[in-house]
Image: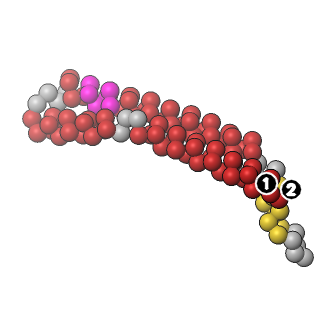
Amino acid sequence: MTIKVGESMASNSLQIDDEYCSGMKQYFTDQGTKLEGYLTEYITILERIRDTGIKGGDVNEALNSYITYANKLKGKISDISTVANTHVSTFLSKIDEADQFLF
């Protein structure tokens, strides 16, 4: 789709590639899923270290706290990718709406 921004001696136009934007929606979804998986794996590794290598003491307590905070990140990455996905959808719908008035 092409939306003309203004006419002058040098023609100005704004071109929005719908397919690229739709691809970015999928990219954000895929990356969110991938990062959530990495976080889950990371937490699992930390728990194994705590359970098998550092069974007590100050370092164990610090690691427990760290694992607790890392667990709080679960779901946040997916939320962010969903928000990014929603923004792309909103952007495309606003462009489509504006496009109706220009052509």
Q: CA distance from mark 2 to mark 1?
A: 6 Å
Q: Residue 17, labelled with which disc?
A: none
Judging depth in this view, the residue of 22 and 49 nearest the camera is 22
Residue 15 visible in the shown view: no
Which residue is rendered at x = 83% and y = 55% of the image? 2
85 up-or-down from 7: above or below: above
93 up-or-down from 102: above or below: above
Which residue is rendered at x = 50% and y = 32% of the image? 33
Residue situated furthest front in the rendering: 101
Give the position of the C terminus as an image quadrant.
Answer: bottom right
Q: Which residue is mark 2?
A: 103
The amino acid sitting under disc 1 is: Asp
The amino acid sitting under disc 2 is: Phe
Mark 1 neighbour class, 10 Å CA radius: few under 14, some 14 to 19, many 20 or more: some
Residues shaded magenta: 43-48
Q: Which residue is mark 1?
A: 99
Q: Position of residue 83 (x, y in %)?
A: 52, 44
